[in-house]
Image (cartoon, grey):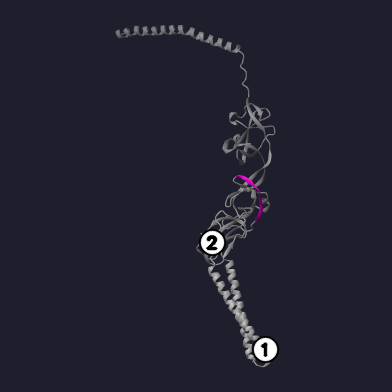
Amino acid sequence: MTDDAKTQKPGLLRRVGRATVRTVLTLGVAAPAIVAVQMGSQELGRRADAAPAPDAAPAMPVEVAPIVLSPGYEVTRSFIGQIEATRTAAVSFELPGRLSEILVDEGDTVAEGQHVATLDTRLLNAERERLEASKAALEAQRKFAEQTVARQENLSDRGFASQAALDAAVAATDDLRSRIAEVDAALLSNGIQVEKSKVYAPFSGRVTERLVDGGESVSPSQGLVEIVEDGAPRLRVGVPLDITEADLAAAVIEIDGVPSGARLISLRPDVDAVTRTRTAIFEVSGEAGVTFGQTARLLLSDTVEMPGIWVPVTTLKEGQRGQWTLLAVDGENTVRSMTVQVVHSAGDQVFVRGAFPKDAQLITTGPQRVTVGQTVDPRTQG
């Protein structure tokens, strides 16, 4: 053994000895602590076993309602129409001329036969005077011709006049009578023109528009004023081809959100080329206080036979794969889930169909606060 080996061997022994001493000291300190922890745990467990168990939490109260099965639901179909007058007329002259006066204005109420406007008739009056003067001259000539005929007949009977002279006198008299008849026809025509120079309201109503001011020349059929009848207004609305008169007999008219009485007048047999609908015409109650040109709604109710229930939309929960579910409480006060299909909605209510247990009650409020399988305290809504 070399001197270096002799020197290293005592050093290694000293290090091993020191490590052994530290281990013994550590175990001497840790052992009592471990024993103390075990004894404390046992004491805590004993005290816990000796303490009384806490009371169970009360079941969560939920509001429920019985599940009432309905045989079907109603669908309301709505169609937009327009209120119009029973009759509308654009008042005009039949003859051309200069407008002398117009006696009504927009918004005025007129009665049937009321004078509305007049043409300038001075030329017609002058023509009438000329014709009357011409007739008077012809009447004088006719009188003289008739006297001539009488004289010629007297002379002819006495043999002092020829038959030719008598025939000429008779022909002159007949010619004058024809000319007088012609003048009478011209006077009649003049009178008709004067009469047609005034226009009258065709029916009682109100003036909606005035198209002329007066003084201008107007042509035949040129509108002067527009008048609408003040009677019961009508609703004109297009409806699909599958709707019958029987369906429309039970229809409801709604004007500005207010239901109004209406009676079906006719359902036209032709189809509108643009909308592909048939036109239905209703007589609206005069008490509705409507305005011509106003829009209205035609409401038709149709019953769909399909068993299901009405539930608030807030009771629906979205399930797997886009399905909808409802939570209900069974006979053991346990929350159960029901898969349903939504088939119709009306405001905050929906009509659903599915399998509904007889003894189940629907959770109507707060379905998100409970889970399937939870025991609850069901309370019927007051």
Quarter-wise, where is residue 188 in the image?
bottom right
Where residue 283 appears, x then y in whole percent? 65, 53
- In contact (CB < 8 Å): disc 1 and disc 2: no
Depicted 365 relative to depicted 156: above or below: above
Q: Quadrant of residue 47?
A: top right
Looking at numbered disc 1 in the image, what kind of residue is underneath it? Asn
178 is within the stretch colored magenta: no
Mark 1 nearby-residue class (10 Å; few <14, some 14–19, many ≥20): some
- Which of 300 and 235 lies nearest the eye of the viewer? 235
Q: Position of residue 143 (x, y in %)?
A: 63, 81
Decide which of 354, 135 is in the foreground and name it. 135
Asked if residue 242 shows in the view, the reply is no
Is 261 contained in the magenta span? yes
Q: Quadrant of the C terminus?
A: top right
Task: From the top left corner, tell me how far across and down residue 171 is, in percent.
Answer: 62, 85
- In the image: residue 160, left or right of residue 218: right
Is 261 situated left or right of 36 in this image? right
In the image, which disc is placed on residue 101?
Answer: 2
How far apart, in angstroms, are the residues tagged by discs 1 and 2?
Answer: 60 Å
> Badge 1 is on which residue?
154
Span of residues in magenta: 257-266
SS of the residue under disc 1: helix
Report crowding for label 2: few under 14, some 14 to 19, many 20 or more residues within 10 A (C-alpha). some
Q: Is residue 284 left or right of residue 122?
A: right
Q: In the rendering, which numbered label is found on residue 244?
A: none
User: Which quarter of the image is occupied by the N terminus?
Assistant: top left
